[in-house]
Amino acid sequence: MSDDKKSPTYNHTEIHHKIEASPKAPGIKAAFRFNHASSPWVRGISSGLSSSLPILIGILFGHLQYGLIASIGGFTYLYTKDEPYAQRAVKLFLALLGITLCFTLGSLFAEVEWIKTILFGVIGAVSVYIFGALKIPGPSAMFFVLSFAVSTSIPAPNLQAVFLHAGLVFLGGALSWCISMSGWLINPRGPETAAVAKAYRQIASFVGSLGTESFHAEQHKTVVELRAAETAMKQAKINRKKSSFSHRLFLLNQKAEGLFIFVMAAANDFNPAVSKKAQAVIETFASEMATLKKHKKIRDVREEIEELSIKEELRTLLLDVNDVLQMKELKETEYIQFSQGSVKARLKAAFHKRSYVLKNALRYGIIMIIAAAVAYTTDIPRSYWIPLTCAGVMLGATVRATVQRGIQRSVGTILGILIGTGILMLEPTGIVIALIVFVLQSTIEIVIVKNYALGTLFITPNALLIAESGHPDKAISYFTSARVIDIVIGSVIGVVGTVLVFKRASSLRLPYLLGDVIRKEGQFLEMLSTEQDEERIKQERNKLQGELVNLRALYDNVIGEYSKTAVKLEGLWPAVVATQQLGYMLLASYEGYELSETEKRELQETFAQLAAAAEQKRAPKLSSVPTLKRYPIIQGEITALYESLQVEI
């Protein structure tokens, strides 16, 4: 083992942290609670331009209807997130192709109701599966379903018209692609720089939480942000040999991973005063990093670091970060990488009979088919709004979130009808339509982060203005009557379908995933004592780290369910915390463990019993855990897990 890969020196005492109370699911009142998120003004204005410019161009060329069709492609912009531009370019282009394909399918089969019904489900299921498997944040299936739904109501008398309309949607999406990518001209490394800065800011919060009840929650958040930063660096295709700035960014990300390892190892060395000082130093790094420029130096905090009463390895690492920001040359040091794996591997990994992602996608598709079937057996005009509403409601992360979305969608839409009716009564034409669409779409993106219901207040008039401006003789009557019925029916189907089909889905999975993760931890510990292939260890490390993140996400879903089982499973919260803590301690281990054959056998039996206890929701059939004289920290964490499972659920 080279000096560059030295494992941190652990204290020979157990690390203890208070366990915070189990998180609680928000009640119905949360549907109308305002979040404290900052308003995304740039995103809002860019989104408004993406939707309104195609309409304006169509008006200038004397084809309002063509402009309205092209504006459907403008929804491509809504799949923009904070990913690096190299990844954004690919993702948005694929989203653009998807929206165009869905629009084309809707036009081709507009008159064949049974095919339309099935396609609603197929489009929804495939979209949800891809977004879930790849953990892509954003509106998921929503705008693929929307483009398909709207196209079924736009007359296309022949095949030539179908492809003309599809081409217009593609051009509108291409324009939104250009708007989204325009930031590259100003700050080409902005997104990945922001991701690394965010990781440092979270590490600072983690350091500040040492010894407090929020320690485990901050620990989990830190790993999530480290994964995001590592993924951003890979997506950006950072070539550290290409420029000094890229090399600095690469080193900063690398040191962030090292910081997490060393803080975990030195957790007992931090008293509250030291934690706050170290937190302030790392927050300084994060603040300056957020605006990092090619030749910019930051304030030198070497003196503050030297004053910290921390282990020398950790002090050296903090000084290294400071030196990188001071543009000093440093050699690279390999640390653990929190990678998410390749796209192909993640899609394949989510496709199995026990996969939550697969089951969620199938559930989504089935309920969408039911909603479409109901829509096309009614005489309501433009009944596609029923499955479209259902699509939006079901994108709630949990059963409770779905119920909340149903309430928000219904209330927001009904109030939005008043706005929409007023707009349509004014009979806007020409450039005024483009201007109204710009204002409404911009407002949606700015306020929806505050409250979903507030966003739907503007979604309704905007969507109807785009879809119905070509039918001024029908717009007001449709808007004030059928739209309300559509929204209520769609919301009810989405909520009822989710509650009935998915009421206990997460609750049923949690004990088995908990047991599976515990079993994998035992296997990984054994591997660290025998395996010499570093590449295989790296692969297994990434798998375990992904499972630890999924475990917490699944627990959050459990507390979002309406069932007696979910309430009982809150008793597993200490075990979830202890499992994550043990897992992260193992992930932070670089050098192998020297275990005797007796210790290996005892550990195999211990982890098998702990896993079985978690799966069967009972106390472990063990009197104690094995003694690991050379590794008291690991023994302490296994003991904590053993004690946390002393419950009957």
Image: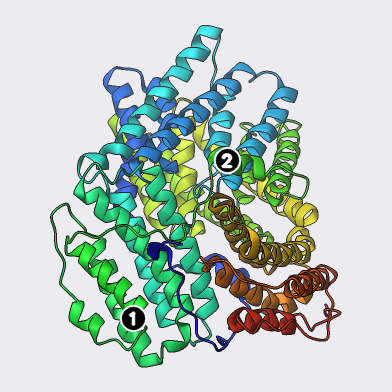
Q: Secondary structure at mark 1?
A: helix
Q: Amino acid at mark 2?
A: Ala
Using residue 622 as the reference point, say whether residue 25 is left or right of it.
left
Using residue 418 as the reference point, say whether residue 372 is left or right of it.
right
Quarter of the image with the C terminus is bottom right
Q: Few, some or many C-alpha atoms within 10 Å of disc 1 (few <14, some 14-19, many ≥20)?
A: few
Residue at the spot of label 1: 312
Which is in the foreground here, disc 2 or disc 1?
1
Find residue 99 and report its horizontal and vertical position in percent: 51, 30
- What residue lies at 35% left-to-right and 67% top-to-bottom? 200
Find residue 596 and report its horizontal and vertical position in percent: 70, 73
Find residue 348 and report its horizontal and vertical position in percent: 65, 40
Q: Amino acid at mark 1?
A: Glu
Q: Which mark is residue 141?
A: 2
Q: Earlier in the sequence, mark 2 or mark 1?
A: 2
Using residue 621 as the reference point, say whether residue 225 is left or right of it.
left
Q: Secondary structure at mark 2?
A: loop
- What residue lies at 37% left-to-right and 64% top-to-bottom? 256
- What residue lies at 46% left-to-right and 62% top-to-bottom? 1
Residue 317 image-quadrant placement = bottom left
